[in-house]
Amino acid sequence: MEKIDCLGEFCPIPIMRLQKAVPKILGGEPMVLVTDHSCTVAAVRDFCGRNHLTYTADEVINGVWEITVSK
């Protein structure tokens, strides 16, 4: 499973990087986006809803989320 490291990056950068990974996701390879901005979790939720993808978000340590996106 590939990781997209977005630590320290503000929206829309994480969504733009996730958009580039959509072909791999649609091909069956889940992606894990790592972020330290809570607003990114909401942005990924909206992105997944618009693109018919599923996601799970886990706060792995205080203030850091791993968001797994799959088809």
Image: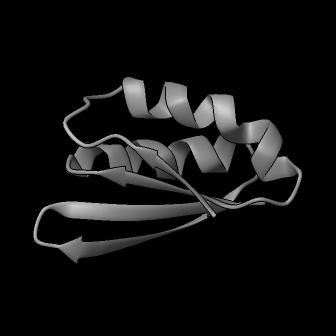
| Residue 30 in picture, x, y percent from top left | 69, 61
Residue 25 percent across, percent down from the top left: 76, 51
Q: Where's residue 13, x and y in %?
A: 39, 24
Name the image quarter holding residue 62: bottom left
Can you say whether 18 is above or below 3 in the image?
Answer: above
Q: How is the image coloured?
A: one colour
Kindly give the residue lying farthest to the right in the view shown: 27
Quadrant for the N terminus, please.
Answer: bottom right
Instruction: Between residue 43 and residue 65, name the one nearer to us.
Output: 65
Instruction: Report the side of 59 relative to 57 (left or right).
Output: left
Residue at (42% x, 41% y) in the render? 43
Image coordinates for residue 11, horizontal then vertical, percent:
32, 28
Check the image and report above or below for 6 versus 70: above
Residue at the image position 48 percent from the left and 47 percent from the top: 44
Residue sitting at 26 percent across and 31 percent down?
9
Q: How many labels, in total?
A: 0
Of the 4 image quadrants, the one containing the C terminus is: bottom right
